[in-house]
């Protein structure tokens, strides 16, 4: 398969698209055509098996083609359970059983498994490392750091907005050392993202440090997310005989695009509904047809605080016509007060504690018109509530148990480097980072 930039339509192959992250023209890579499956064509049962089948067309013709099943087994080695909630019609897809307890572990681990195998193919020698830059609003950086920590030939620079991630998130960003550096930026997530984008379009800096990206813009992160939407839809379809609707909490639109791609690939997904927080760029665009990116506002669902969702470029590439886009996807904003109420209500109703991001999805479910609510729905749970204990524990009035992997990380010492929110500050920090791998 060939991959095209959303901007110039310049073409490349899978290994190059993954190693570059962002296309040289600033666009995002998309497949030249999405493959299509009939639901009963896919035979696999586990996530790793289904991923190997539905992602095979993306790897076709690549030197990594034969390694795909092994990459899937390596990367997707933790449970991703689809848990029924009420009478089998409503289910939650728990995406938070990986090393850093959020769905981003899925994409980060897959990308790490792909890159490790792609480096020698792409002609990189291990004497000079590749540098991965990640702008994070909370979860991406920890997941990427965990997935790549200790891998030879790759170093990781994580940029996070000062004071805008939860204490436990911050710990997961700053506890690595070795080939991982955490940069605490005196600005917003959008500033962090702009700094990374600026670094990529500086040809000299890019070449000096062999920069590559691991954000949700990297195709290698998006593909396994397509796979879990596919797997969950197939599990539901096989058990109940109907196509479930998906409710997807989203911010930068990675998880949202993954769900929409899975549907476009013929997976049994009835419809896709996006839940966003008070950052309303996406629902406002669907309502007015006017794309108005804006500075992000802070919310309780901080990993979704994105005012200029990058992956919109991929969505508009798939569905350039506004009416087609409106027919394919809905999006609803959920504010902080509604998030808090939803967490309290569902702790009573289901005995389940949601993280603030997941709560936006359940709020959207509860506010669908009653006839629509009676259909089958799958809500994606994007993080474990223990990552946001300072928000959820006062609401539910009890402590939430911490997953053991997370508890282990939180024992490690931390370190970070303060940065001004400018491209120049990042360039200087990279140049001052000694190659010691
Ligand atoms: C990143 C993140 C989101 C939003 O993901 P997108 O890929 O931007 O859609 C939602 N919830 C959590 C917990 C996250 O970490």
Image (cartoon, rainbow, N blue to C red):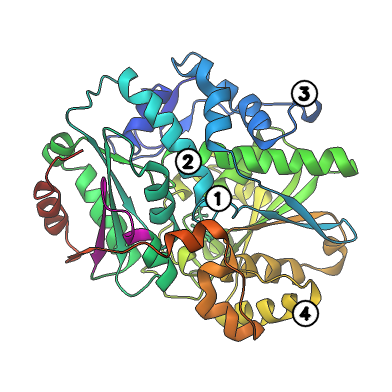
Residue 155 pos. (x, y %): 26, 42
The tag earlier along the polypeptide, 2 or 3, is 3
Residue 374 pos. (x, y %): 88, 61
Q: Which of 342 and 9 lies nearest the eye of the viewer? A: 342
- Asked if disc 1 and disc 2 are in contact, CB closer than 8 Å, the reply is yes
- Indicate if the residue with disc 4 has its beta carbon within 8 Å of ligand 1: no
Q: Quadrant of the C terminus?
A: top left
Q: Distance of mark 1 from mark 3, alpha carbons? A: 29 Å
The residue labelled by disc 3 is: 41
Image side of residue 155 versus residue 431, left or right:
right
The tag earlier along the polypeptide, 1 or 3, is 3
Over which residues does the magenta segment extend? 173-185
- Asked if disc 4 and disc 1 are in contact, CB closer than 8 Å, the reply is no
The residue labelled by disc 4 is: 348
The residue labelled by disc 2 is: 109
The residue labelled by disc 1 is: 98
């Amino acid at each position: 398969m060939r991959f095209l930039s959303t901007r110039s339509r310049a073409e490349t192959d899978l290994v190059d698209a993954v190693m570059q992250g962002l296309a040289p023209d600033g666009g995002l890579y998309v497949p030249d055509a999405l493959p299509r499956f009939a639901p009963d064509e896919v035979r696999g049962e586990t996530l790793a098996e289904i991923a190997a089948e539905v992602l095979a067309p993306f790897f076709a013709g690549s030197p990594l083609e034969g390694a795909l099943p092994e990459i899937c087994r390596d990367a997707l080695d933790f449970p991703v359970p689809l848990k029924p909630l009420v009478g089998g019609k409503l289910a939650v897809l728990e995406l938070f059983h990986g090393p850093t307890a959020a769905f981003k572990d899925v994409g980060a681990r897959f990308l790490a498994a792909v890159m490790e195998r792609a480096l020698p193919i792409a002609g990189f020698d291990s004497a000079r490392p590749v540098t991965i830059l990640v702008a994070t609003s909370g979860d991406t950086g920890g997941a990427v750091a965990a997935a790549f920590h200790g891998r030879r030939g790759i170093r990781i620079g994580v940029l996070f907005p000062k004071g805008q991630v939860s204490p436990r998130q911050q710990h997961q960003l700053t506890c690595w050392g070795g080939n991982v550096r955490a940069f605490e930026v005196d600005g917003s997530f959008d500033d962090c993202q702009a700094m990374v984008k600026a670094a990529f379009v500086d040809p000299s800096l890019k070449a000096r440090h062999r920069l590559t990206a691991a954000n949700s813009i990297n195709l290698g992160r998006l593909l396994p997310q397509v796979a879990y939407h596919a797997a969950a839809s197939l599990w539901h379809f096989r058990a109940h005989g109907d196509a479930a609707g998906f409710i997807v909490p989203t911010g930068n639109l990675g998880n949202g695009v993954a769900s929409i791609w899975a549907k476009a690939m013929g997976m049994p997904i009835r419809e896709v509904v996006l839940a966003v927080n008070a950052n309303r760029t996406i629902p406002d665009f669907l309502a007015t047809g006017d794309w108005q990116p804006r500075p992000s506002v802070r919310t309780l669902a901080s990993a979704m605080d994105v005012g200029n969702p990058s992956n919109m470029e991929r969505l508009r590439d798939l569905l350039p016509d506004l009416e087609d886009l409106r027919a394919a996807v809905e999006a609803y904003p959920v504010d902080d007060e509604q998030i808090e109420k939803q967490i309290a209500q569902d702790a009573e109703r289901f005995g389940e504690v949601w993280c603030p991001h997941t709560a936006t999805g359940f709020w959207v479910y509860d506010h669908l018109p009653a006839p629509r609510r009676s259909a089958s729905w799958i809500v994606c749970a994007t993080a474990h509530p223990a990552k946001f204990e300072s928000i959820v524990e006062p609401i539910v009035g009890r402590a939430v148990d911490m997953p053991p992997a997370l508890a282990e990380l939180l024992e490690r010492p931390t370190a970070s480097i303060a940065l001004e929110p400018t491209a120049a500050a990042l360039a200087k920090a990279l140049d001052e980072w000694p190659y010691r791998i």
